[in-house]
Image (cartoon, grey):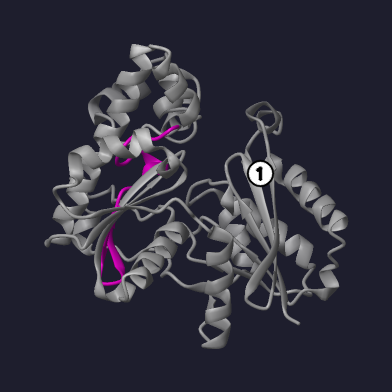
């Protein structure tokens, strides 16, 4: 019987699943506090902690690596590549660790999987966050030496798009969709007949602000801040990804906590939370315009899709554009499994070069 270990490393959690044939039979989520992760230093300093906890899980579940057909991991963040299923290799891990293409917790999964595999088990990944299908017009910024990049929650976008298409008896390739993922970072994408022709890049300061991302900020003010002696380069970069957005204003990345503050009468929390929803709504409108036609639907996914309060703020501003569907279930472990199994079945596992 084919068995796969599935690893999904997130900002504050490690999600693990064991699949037999085409079904996930057991899952576990290991959560980490900000204090614990901060004590590790930088992102790659978390490697041993995350690896050891996964190994403990495998021991508790009595899962033998020798019984596995392979390991599937989310990520990593490497050079721009097409969507699809890939065989993880040493070059992919090396590029992820270099940080040249950015840093994201999902990149840890590639090395963890390779270590666990020990060179004997094949390691796969599906729809990494650097998957790139953007049209040429979407890459321009106004400066020849700076181009917009395609970094977003590809796996989740792709999974919910296909799930929605199936639910209405169509294929993903038949639809024009606007999809926004509401997580610690926010992405808003224009899905045109199965390809993402444009998307915001919250990882590098583009689009709506998120729970811990600044999103787009006035360039002149950022330049002034970088030239002053008040902020180091490292500090400013951390604001773009990890210390900006709601966290910078309210010192939390917990949407439920923000909503509790609002219920308790915190007007500042209300204004900032509503401002984030305002920016997401603007992003949805822009993504619809990029399609060049009326969207068949607007899909809202990610952690904050579970918040009726927050999603209603977006619905109030954008429901005139197209029908809106809240996609609460992310099912990323299942999406990873399906992507690899389809790639193997159709002999379409891609090589990273």
Look at the image and tell me whether residue 352 can be seen: no
Provide residue 258's location: percent of width, then percent of height: 44, 23
Vertical arrangement, residue 332 with respect to residue 87, above or below: above
Q: Is residue 82 above or below residue 262?
A: below
Q: Is residue 29 visible?
A: yes
The 10 Å Cα crowd at callout 1, few under 14, some 14 to 19, many 20 or more, is: some
- Label 1: which residue? 44
Which part of the image, by quadrant, shows the N terminus? bottom right
Corner quadrant of residue 5: bottom right
Please tell me which residue is depicted at 15% across the width and 51% down the height of the picture: 321
Q: In the image, is residue 10 above or below residue 71?
A: above
Residue 24 lies left or right of residue 102; in this view the side is right
Residue 315 lies, in percent from the top left, at 25, 42
- Residue shown at 41%/33% (left/top)? 240
- Mark 1 element type: helix
Q: Nearer the viewer, residue 325 or 208?
A: 325
Residue that appears at 40% across and 59% down: 157
- Residue 20, quarter of picture: bottom right
Residue in the foreground of this view, choosing between 335 and 55: 335
Up-down: is 155 above or below 9?
A: below
Task: Provide residue 106's location: percent of width, then percent of height.
Answer: 57, 52
Residue beneath the point at 45% across and 57% down: 156
**Residue 206, percent from left and from top:** 31, 41
Residue in the foreground of this view, choosing between 175 and 224: 175
Left or right relative to 73: residue 221: left
| Residue farthest bottom in this picture | 346
Whether the magenta-drawn stretch holds residue 206 is answered as yes
Q: Magenta residues, as a range?
A: 189-211
Q: Is residue 183 magenta?
A: no
């Amino acid at each position: 019987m084919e068995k796969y270990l599935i690893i999904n490393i997130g900002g504050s959690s490690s999600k693990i699943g064991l699949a037999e044939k085409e079904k996930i039979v057991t899952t576990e989520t290991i959560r980490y506090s900000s204090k614990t992760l901060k004590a590790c230093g930088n992102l790659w300093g978390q490697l041993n902690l995350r690896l050891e906890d996964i190994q403990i899980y495998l021991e508790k579940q009595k899962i033998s690596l020798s019984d596995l057909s392979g390991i599937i991991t989310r990520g990593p963040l490497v050079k721009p590549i097409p969507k699809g299923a890939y065989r993880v290799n040493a070059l992919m891990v090396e590029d992820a660790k270099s940080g040249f293409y950015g840093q994201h917790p999902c990149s840890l999964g590639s090395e963890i999987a390779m270590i666990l595999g020990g060179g004997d088990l094949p390691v796969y990944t599906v729809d990494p966050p650097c998957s790139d299908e953007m049209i040429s017009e979407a890459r321009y910024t106004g400066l020849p030496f700076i181009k917009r990049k395609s970094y977003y929650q590809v796996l989740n976008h792709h999974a919910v798009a296909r799930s929605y298409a199936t639910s209405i008896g169509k294929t993903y390739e038949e639809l024009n969709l606007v999809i926004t993922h509401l997580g610690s970072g926010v992405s808003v994408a224009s899905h045109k007949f199965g390809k993402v022709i444009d998307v915001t890049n919250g990882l590098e300061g583009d689009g709506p602000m998120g729970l811990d991302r600044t999103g787009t900020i006035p360039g002149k003010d950022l330049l002034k801040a970088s030239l002053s002696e008040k902020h180091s380069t490292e500090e400013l970069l951390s604001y773009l990804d990890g210390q900006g957005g709601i966290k910078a204003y309210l010192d939390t990345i917990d949407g439920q906590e923000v909503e509790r503050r609002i219920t308790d009468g915190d007007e500042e929390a209300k204004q900032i939370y509503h401002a984030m929803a305002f920016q997401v709504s603007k992003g949805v409108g822009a993504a619809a315009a990029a399609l060049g036609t009326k969207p068949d639907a607007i899909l809202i996914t990610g952690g904050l899709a579970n918040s009726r309060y927050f999603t209603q703020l977006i619905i109030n501003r954008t429901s005139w554009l197209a029908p809106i569907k809240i996609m609460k279930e992310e099912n990323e472990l299942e999406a990873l499994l399906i992507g690899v199994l389809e790639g193997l079945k159709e002999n379409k596992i891609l090589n990273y070069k």
